[in-house]
Image (cartoon, rainbow, N blue to C red):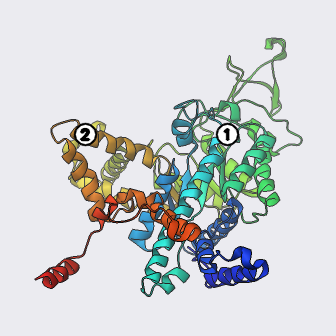
């Protein structure tokens, strides 16, 4: 990830000094040093600044992946700005850089957790404004993380510590976000308008799927209905025009196909000439040969291979695809999307199987060699069962003894720690590496991790707190862990901006500022001293 530009502080300092000279005594209370410090702590003035900055990062990362698939990228889905903030603070703490770590905004989580209608299924029923609203919220929290960390560094600088290099080379918490626009929330004009709002909020990458907008279903549920290619291409164009209008030339479009699990279409496109896209789409529709005498009034008919055929139509008016055409439809969707402005692909799959993903991607790469995926490492998959089954089948194929295992009951805890279980866990551990190398996956994400972690942690805390452990459940399971693991929000007042606000109030009011910090601030209890410092104090007291 790129650092703050060298000299940003000194440049801001010179600008304010010049302005002070221009406006004279009326600006006497304004400190150029303080103003430059505040400007440095708020590098990104608008969401468009963020979108342009992060889009260039994604483009660089895509080139790095093309050169070496070990350079894949990752993200976790976040449904609140605080969750995203704590994720990126933790990334910086543990890995010293945010490079190749992104954020993901899941339409599923917006529907389930952010709608004013209350919890909703993933069917595009939530307010479309909730999506750009969450993007803006996430970047507000990330910019605050920048301001808080830089404020601490400036405090240390004022106290005499040599941290100028850390200030000059500060790495921002602001990273790319891949944002889910579902099926576009309406026609192509609606898609364009929403895409603009998302980009203005900071999104550099927009993910859009080829389902019918008003019949949208979660990618891991049944009942999905896809649209003809020309309808989807129109929405790809709408997103690209939105990026270009707003000056985000590097904006990234992720084209998702749900055709692997979709068996229905709402619309029969019009073929203009043999073999065109509409004709190829129509070839996938299930039909039955009929004579004109068998046809009722107002039925839809097609001519196929010189024969009169009737598309199979359900009572709800939807048309069925032929069984076994799903993979061919996926491949055609992917090729068509990349040939019409998409940058990355997303293929919804029924299981996380490297070989099955690679089989589809390799067919796409026969036409477009640098095709690459964003892949959902979904919580909708039972990862344990899927990989234990894969290992079991591989052992059978290799002639290994599997008599100790019941294939129909591989989730049984009795198999934990067995050879089969250990092999499966190792395959899960290396899934991202393996699939990025063998199946063209550039970006790995988990859509709903913080939905599940919140539920799990509340389950565990509730069990203890309302039981015999009482307050000890919180102290042992939460606070003590925060302190010992250096989790930033253990000082929740600081994390909410209290120290930052104290310094700003001092800039604005001088000695008259009423500040929250001081001896009676209970956050001081969380100042953990090193063993060396405690020993030194003890020796001085003695």
Q: Quadrant of residue 413?
A: top left
Say which element carries label 2.
loop
The N terminus is located in which quarter? bottom right
| Direction from residue 41 to residue 456 in the image, left or right | left
Q: Position of residue 416 (x, y in %)?
A: 22, 49
Say which element carries label 1.
loop
Q: How many numbered marks appear?
A: 2
| Residue indicated by mark 2 | 406
Q: Residue at x 47, y 51 (%)?
A: 377
| Direction from residue 190 to residue 462 in the image, left or right | left
Above or below — where is 236 with respect to 268?
below
Please tell me which residue lies in front, 525 or 244.
525
Compare marks 2 and 1 and give the one earlier in the sequence: 1
Residue farthest along the left direction in this orientation:
542
Please tell me which residue lies in front, 83 or 423.
83
Q: Residue at x 81, y 28 (%)?
A: 302
| Direction from residue 397 to residue 42 in the image, left or right | right
Above or below — where is 468 with respect to 70?
above
Q: Position of residue 204 (x, y in %)?
A: 66, 60
Q: Residue at x 36, y 60 (%)?
A: 491
Is residue 214 among the parts visible in the rendering?
A: yes
Above or below — where is 151 with respect to 47?
below
Q: Residue at x 56, y 37 (%)?
A: 111
Please tell me which residue lies in front, 303 or 46.
46
Above or below — where is 110 with respect to 121?
below
Q: Which mark is residue 128?
A: 1
Q: Position of residue 300 (x, y in %)?
A: 81, 22
Q: Nearer the viewer, mark 2 or mark 1?
A: 1
The residue carrying pointer 2 sits among few (fewer than 14), some (14 to 19) or many (20 or more) residues within 10 Å by Cα, namely few
């Amino acid at each position: 990830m790129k650092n703050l530009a060298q000299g940003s502080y000194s440049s801001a300092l010179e600008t304010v000094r010049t302005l002070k000279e221009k406006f004279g005594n009326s600006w006497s209370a304004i400190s150029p040093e303080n103003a430059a410090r505040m400007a440095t702590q708020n590098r990104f003035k608008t969401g468009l600044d963020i979108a342009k900055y992060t889009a260039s990062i994604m483009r660089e990362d895509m080139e790095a992946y093309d050169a070496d698939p070990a350079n894949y990228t990752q993200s976790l889905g976040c449904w609140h700005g605080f969750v995203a903030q704590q994720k990126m603070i933790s990334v910086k703490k543990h890995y010293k850089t945010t490079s190749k770590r992104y954020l993901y905004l899941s339409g599923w989580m917006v529907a389930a957790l952010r709608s004013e209608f209350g919890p909703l299924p993933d069917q595009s029923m939530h307010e479309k404004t909730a999506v750009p609203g969450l993007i803006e919220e996430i970047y507000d929290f990330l910019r605050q993380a920048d301001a808080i960390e830089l404020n601490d560094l400036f405090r240390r600088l004022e106290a005499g510590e040599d941290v100028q290099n850390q200030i000059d080379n500060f790495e921002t918490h602001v990273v790319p976000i891949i944002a889910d626009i579902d099926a576009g929330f309406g026609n192509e004009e609606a898609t364009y308008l929403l895409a603009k709002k998302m980009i203005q909020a900071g999104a550099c990458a927009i993910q859009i799927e080829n389902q019918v907008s008003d019949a949208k279903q979660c990618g891991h549920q049944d009942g999905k209905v896809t649209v003809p290619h020309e309808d989807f291409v129109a929405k790809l164009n709408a997103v690209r025009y939105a990026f270009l209008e707003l000056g985000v030339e590097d904006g990234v479009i992720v084209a998702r196909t749900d055709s692997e699990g979709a068996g229905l279409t709402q619309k029969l496109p019009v073929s203009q000439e043999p073999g065109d896209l509409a004709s190829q789409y129509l070839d996938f529709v299930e039909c039955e040969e009929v004579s004109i005498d068998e046809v009722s009034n107002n039925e839809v008919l097609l001519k196929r291979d010189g024969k009169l055929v009737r598309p199979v139509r359900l009572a709800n008016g939807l048309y069925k695809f032929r069984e076994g055409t799903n993979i061919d439809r996926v491949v055609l969707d992917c090729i068509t999307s990349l040939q019409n402005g998409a940058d990355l692909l997303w293929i919804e799959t029924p299981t996380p199987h490297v070989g099955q993903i690679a089989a589809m991607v390799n067919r796409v790469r026969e036409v477009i060699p640098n095709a690459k995926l964003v892949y959902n490492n979904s919580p909708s998959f039972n990862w344990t069962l899927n990989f234990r089954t894969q290992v079991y089948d591989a052992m059978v194929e290799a002639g290994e003894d599997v008599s100790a295992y019941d294939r129909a009951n591989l989730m049984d805890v009795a198999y934990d720690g067995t050879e089969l279980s250990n092999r499966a866990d190792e395959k899960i551990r290396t899934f991202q590496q393996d699939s990025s190398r063998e199946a063209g996956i550039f970006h790995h994400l988990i859509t709903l991790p913080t939905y599940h972690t919140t539920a799990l942690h509340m389950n565990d805390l509730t069990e203890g707190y309302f039981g015999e452990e009482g307050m000890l459940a919180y102290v042992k399971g939460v606070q003590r862990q925060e302190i010992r693991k250096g989790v930033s929000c253990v000082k929740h007042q600081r994390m909410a901006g209290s120290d930052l606000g104290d310094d700003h109030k001092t800039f604005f009011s001088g000695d008259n500022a009423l500040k929250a910090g001081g001896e009676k601030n209970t956050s001081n209890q969380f100042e953990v001293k090193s063993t060396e410092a405690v020993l030194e104090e003890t020796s001085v007291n003695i």
